[in-house]
Image: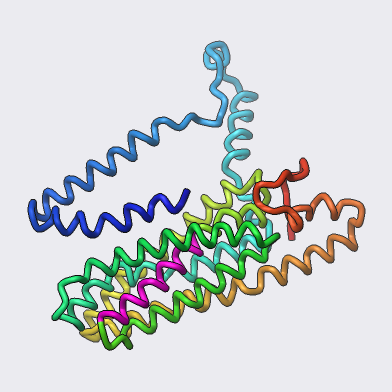
Amino acid sequence: MTAGSSLFSVTMPFLLKKIGDTLGLAHTLQILSVLMFIQIFLSLTYKPLLPLPSAGERSKPDKTEELKCIHRFKKYLNLRVFRKVTYRIWAFGIATAVLGYFVPYVHLVNFVEKEFSETDRNWILLVCIGASSGIGRLTFGKIGDCIPGPKKIFLQVASFWILGIMSMMIPLCKGFEHVLIVCIFLGFCDGCFITIMAPIAFELVGPQDASQAIGFLLGLMAIPMTAGPPIAGILYDHFHNYRMAFYLAGIPPIIGGSVLFFIPIIHNRIRKRQEKEEPGTDRMLLASENVFNGDMLPSNSNAEVSA
């Protein structure tokens, strides 16, 4: 499913360049706004999960109904996932890692225009990132299905480490072809990070709370992902080049990946402690260790105990 967005990532740079050269910036932004409105209309096709009250219930509101409404709200929007140590580490580790995530996407084209002014194919960079990201999502999605339990996180660890190293290597590129190679690696890392996110949430909090876990994670990611490119722009204004911006953009992914590295170790310690405290329930609570994506799970929705 996530590979579908890569199709637009491949085609949009070429289309936007043609539309921008032909119609100008104003009309290009208007066309993009129309595409956003299409997404808004499509979102109206989703049906709410919360049950709607009947006409009689609406005409006689009381405190009991208010309490029921609050209970339903807490059921579908709760902070229970943060009780799990492994999820907290995973969420805040990824939030740290994505601080430099968007810096290459936003500033790479300007960097190439400044350093390799002889080329007019800078739009190909984003095409390479989008194409390799799509291939990476398809490839690592299949690989992730073959790795049981939270060991899938090691794929994210490797992707963040490589992404950080590649960001630091961008200023060291001596030719446009070298930048293309770096973009291919960036795309593969992006594909791995995105496609493995939902399976990891499934393993850490269970199927019942997976959607909540992903929602909170995306919320935590929003601020650092948005702050990264403006910070890089400030560094460019100060140093008058992108070298320091790309060097510093590679540090958060390496730190975040290093934090994620310890999650499987902590998970194993929690499992061993649970086996000692409640030996009769360890098989049910930790059944996801031996379950691959797509297999049937026991009735218990929590794959890991709270810690």
Name the side, left or right, on which 88 lies relative to 177: right
Residue at (28% x, 69% y) in the render: 125
Quarter of image, res 36: top left
If the image is split into quadrants, where does the C terminus sit?
bottom right
Name the side, left or right, on which 96 lies relative to 110: right
* Residue 56 position within the rendered picture, expressed as x and y whole percent measured from the top left: 56, 11
263 or 193: which is nearer to us?
193
Residue at (31% x, 75% y) in the render: 180
Outermost residue toward the top in this view: 56
Residue at (21% x, 58% y) in the render: 14
Is residue 100 at least partly visible in the picture? no
Compared with residue 58, is residue 299 higher up or lower down, i.e. above or below? below
202 or 80: which is nearer to us?
202
Quarter of image, res 103: bottom left
Compared with residue 168, is residue 215 higher up or lower down, i.e. above or below? above
* Residue 268 position within the rendered picture, expressed as x and y whole percent measured from the top left: 76, 67
Would you say the magenta stretch is mainly helix, strand or loop? helix
188 drawn magenta: yes
Q: How many marks?
A: 0
Quarter of image, res 12: bottom left
Residue at (57% x, 42% y) in the render: 77
Q: How is the image coloured?
A: rainbow
What's the magenta region?
176-194
Is residue 140 at least partly visible in the picture? yes
228 drawn magenta: no
Name the side, left or right, on which 176 lies relative to 209: left
237 or 6: which is nearer to us?
6
* Residue 33 position within the rendered picture, expressed as x and y whole percent measured from the top left: 23, 45
* Residue 228 position within the rendered picture, expressed as x and y whole percent measured from the top left: 36, 70
